Image: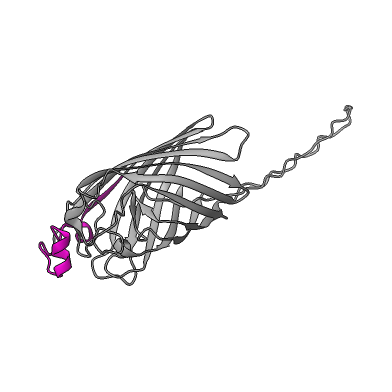
Amino acid sequence: MKWYQAAVSVAFFALPIAVEAQSTPNDKAEPAAETAPPPALTVSGSAAIASDYRFRGVSQSDKDMAVQGGITVSHASGPYAGAWASNLAGWGTFGGANMELDLIGGYKAQLADNAALDVGLTWYMYPGGADKTDFAEPYIKLTGTAGAATLTAGAAYAPEQQAIGKWYNTGADAATGVYTNPGDKDDNLYLWGDGALALAGMPFTAKAHVGHSWGQNGLGPNATAVSPTGEYWDWSLGVDATYKNLTFNVSYVDTDISTKEATYLRPSFSTGQDGTGNIAGGTLVVSLTAAF
């Protein structure tokens, strides 16, 4: 699951205050004060700084710092649209792009007071990168709450596209710059679950995540891949500390992609793309997010 942004929406309600007096037959009822309805459109967003940008457990910033931000416009009836961006480095540059820009649109339906269904699509863009970098990925999420606990189950499926095809069988093939399977298309499936538990009387929320990817077992046209080893697990455990509109997060992020297993993807799949350093290994990620 992507390290996704926090959002805050604030609504003000005017509550009428009435003082009751003893009534008489000649008293006339006073009209009730009207309550202002909540706005139909809300705008929310965030800006963040993180010690590493991990997408489904794999570093997209070469294990270096990332600056990120996003904005979302939502309508009370359910539809929403937004954008999110982050800097990139190393493996995550998709043929030279130093930025990822995600365009997001969807519909959120309230199934009950404690349950919501979210259906949408993310268009991953890499401005300035090589050709055939962008791809689309529809998703669906079901979220439920029970007391202080929130659980989310989600699925994201990217249909066959060249950007996530297996153009190189190995990292050595990519290093030569000669495509093994030019024009190849592949799809990608990602299933995940998230859990959050707010600690009573404290500004802390414990969080957990687990996800599993299925996709191409090799490298795409820009020597990158959404699921580089064909399939793998990613997970994280962390805690949020919130003060007003600021959230400080510390999380341990890891995958089951070992250095040995990823050897055939090198030098692309490595720190600095120099053939050493595991960009999918366990690490502590620290971030600070300001929501508005």
What color scheme is it? one colour
Is 62 situated left or right of 48 in this image?
left
Residue 68 location, x and y as percent? Answer: 46, 60
Where is the C terminus found, in terms of image quarters? bottom right
Where residue 131 sits, quadrant-wise, is bottom left
Could you tell me which residue is drawn at 30 percent across and 53 percent down?
Answer: 137
Depicted 150 relative to depicted 282: above or below: above
Could you tell me which residue is drawn at 58 percent across and 51 percent down?
Answer: 246
* Front residue (pair 208, 272): 272
Could you tell me which residue is drawn at 20 percent across and 49 percent down?
Answer: 260
Residue 33 visible somewhere in the drawing? yes
Depicted 86 relative to depicted 28: above or below: below
Which residue reaches farthest left? Answer: 180
Which residue reaches farthest bottom? Answer: 128
Q: Is residue 129 magenta?
A: no
Is 186 situated left or right of 123 in this image?
left
Residue 112 visible somewhere in the drawing? no
Residue numbers of the magenta segment: 156-183
Residue 12 location, x and y as percent? Answer: 66, 47
Could you tell me which residue is drawn at 24 percent across and 56 percent down?
Answer: 225
* Front residue (pair 131, 172): 172
* Front residue (pair 75, 72): 72
